[in-house]
Image: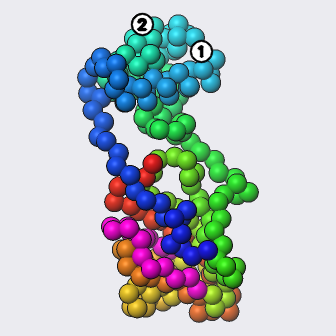
Amino acid sequence: MSAQEPSRFLASADEPGLDLTHLETQEEDPISQRVAQNLQRLRSKRHLSLDALARQCGVSRAMLAQIESGRSVPSIKVLCKIAKGLKVSVAAFLEHRAFEGVAVLPSSQSKRLVSANGAFVSRALFPFDVARQSEFYELRLSPLGEDQSEGHGPGVQENLVVSQGVLEISVNEERYLLSTGDSILFYADQPHRYRNPADSEAVAYLVVTYPERLD
């Protein structure tokens, strides 16, 4: 499978800005619903009643009930208190999906993309089901193997470092030879190619950065 497959480089999506600087009461506010769902999930996971959480974080039971029902969006100060009480990141309340600030991804569960001839293997080092603006991959290229991409979306950047062997990176036919420890940064919305010119396997780590957050 080539590096330009959609499962590796996903289309970007707009993420609305968040304004949590003051308390609001909005019945249908999507942010309040997101915070409410995540608070209920995190509290239930810890088997805490509203009273127990109130004692743990120093926020009143009435306030917690309003937030959890989606009737109010908490201020940043209140959200920080709740996050501290639950021992999670504030971002855990704003994610579309369950993510509490730490995610362990066992090697056996990593998503791998393999080219048709098996020469190129890309392993995702991040959870696909979490909103993100960058992606992290391990790349393995067999001796004399190569992988070609016609380019990704506008503004996408790739930052690669070689950890084993050598790699030749071509960007719009301009070639760059990288040895172990060398790195390269380039806009990947143009044709580019990875090629291993040596008779031993090459290993590299790649960070892909998108101009907008992916959901």
Q: Which residue does the image show at 43% across and 52% down from the upper left?
A: 214
The quadrant in which residue 184 appears is bottom left
The amino acid at mark 1 is Leu
**Residue 39 visible at all:** yes
The quadrant in which residue 33 appears is top left
Q: Which residue is mark 2?
A: 62
The residue tagged with tag 2: helix, strand or loop? helix
Placement of 160 over or under 92, stated as above or below: below
Give how far across and how far down residue 55 sits, in percent: 50, 10
Q: Which residue does the image show at 37% across and 16% down from the upper left?
A: 71
The residue tagged with tag 1: helix, strand or loop? loop
Q: Which residue does the image show at 46% across and 38% down from the upper left?
A: 95
Give how far across and how far down residue 138 sits, in percent: 59, 68
Which is nearer the eye, 157 or 151?
151
Q: Which residue does the image show at 41% across and 62% down from the upper left?
A: 209
Give how far across and how far down residue 34 sits, in percent: 43, 30
The amino acid at mark 2 is Ala
Placement of 138 over or under 21, stated as above or below: below
Of the numbered discs in the image, which one, if any, rests on residue 199? none
Give how far across and how far down residue 156 sits, in percent: 38, 67
Q: Which residue is mark 1?
A: 48
Q: Is residue 1 magenta?
A: no
Placement of 105 over or under 210, stated as above or below: above
Q: Earlier in the sequence, mark 2 or mark 1?
A: 1
The magenta stretch is 146-161
Which is nearer the eye, 52 or 62?
62
